[in-house]
Structure formats: C-alpha cells, structure tokens
Image (spheres, rainbow, N blue to C red):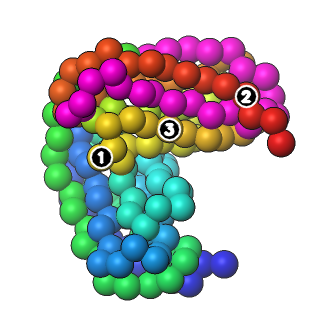
Amino acid sequence: MNEFFQTYTCELPQGKTWRVSIIPERDNVDFDLMIEDPIGNIIAQDNSTNADAYCTFTSFISGTYLFRVTSVKGSCKFAIDINPVTILFSRNYYHHLENGIVWKVAVIPTAKNVNFNLYIEDPKGQAIIQDSSPDPSATCVFTSTIKGNYCFRVESLKGMSDFDFKIEGLID
C-alpha cells in the first residue's frame, strides 16, 4: 500500500527531451515516478524497487506536465530535477511476443562511460515500461498482455558503444 504521493507540475515547451530524477536523501525507501502530458496521457513511469526514480521523455506538445512521486516504502526528503538532455542515437527493435509471458529485456553496453535507456511499447503503441536510470545498461521485466509486435527503443544519452540486446521469456 502506498504511504504517500506528491504531485508537481512544470510548464514545458514542445520538442525537447527531458530527464526527470527523483533523488532521495536515504536508501531505505522506494520512490516511484509517473509523468502525464498536458492531455492526461501517462507518457513515462519508473516503478522499480530502487530508492531513486528516473524517467526520460520528449515533450511532443507544449503545456503543463504532471509529475507524481509515490512512496511505496518508507519516506524521506527528496530532490526532483527536471533537465533537458540530448539523445545521441535512437534505434527501434521489433519482436513478435506471445500473450501472458513474463519477459526480461536487457541492453548491455560493450564499453564504459555510456548510458543506454530502454523503452517498450505494446502492439497498440502504448508505453508499458522503461528504464531510463543513469546506469550504463538498461533492463526491463514485464508481462506481455497482447499477442503481437512489441517495439523496443534503445537510446543513448551519453557515449557511443556497441551493445548486446537480450530478450528472454521467464518461467514462473
């Protein structure tokens, strides 16, 4: 059960890419982040079990964006940073997935000093999960809810490197 949530708003111009960081002052908490565009669509979220939370998104329309920070475990003071970033490259991969399977997807760089993000959309184009943490690699675990072609977008915000792209079905 959620202990609390707070919402913040920010006026953002169209056509820029942003990184939102939730940085707690302690490690024994679990903050999640959800971002809505001015129309009310959820465009990014971080529901990891890490203390911090990160999302990267592009503001496709100008307006007021909503940032909802939820404490799933514990509470403490935290900083929220919203900064523009530059995408060095972006590549889409498409894989046909069966319905009702838990999948693990990983992007693992072959060099140091890089930062890969991973975004996954279902066959209807709905964003379902992302890893936009500042870690070099990116990993997402999700359950496919629709049979069809899923989109896996890999972006680099820091450095260039070859990478291994791995997708595997997990057995319960």
x%, y% of residue 119?
46, 34
The amino acid beneath tag 3 is: Thr
Q: Does the residue at mark 1 contact the one at mark 3 (Cβ under 8 Å)?
A: no
Q: Are marks 2 and 3 in contact (CB under 8 Å)?
A: no
Determine the secondary structure under disc 2. strand
Q: Which of the marked residues, 1 or 3, is nearer the chain's N terminus?
A: 1
Position of residue 139 in the picture relative to residue 35 (left or right) = right
Q: Where residue 78 sits: x, y (%)?
A: 30, 77
Q: Is residue 166 magenta?
A: no
Q: Looking at the picture, how far across and down is residue 9, in whole percent?
A: 29, 67
Q: Earlier in the sequence, mark 2 or mark 1?
A: 1
Kindly identify which residue carries mark 3: 139
Q: Residues within 10 Å of mark 1 (few under 14, many from 20)?
A: some
**Residue 29 falls left or right of residue 60:** right
Q: Which residues are magenta?
A: 92-114
Is 95 covered by the magenta stretch?
yes
Residue occupying image coordinates x 33% and y 74%: 24
Q: CA–CA distance between discs 1 and 3?
A: 12 Å
* For residue 73, side relative to residue 29 (left or right): right
Q: Secondary structure at mark 3?
A: strand
Quarter of the N terminus within the rendering: bottom right
Picture quadrant where residue 155 is located: top left
Residue sitting at x 68%, y 33%: 103
**Most frequent secondary structure within the magenta stretch:** strand
Badge number at residue 134: 1
Task: Kindly identify the amino acid type of the residue bearing the numbered disc 1.
Answer: Pro
Q: Quadrant of the C terminus?
A: top right
Q: Which residue is mark 2?
A: 169
Closer-to-camera residue (16/50):
50
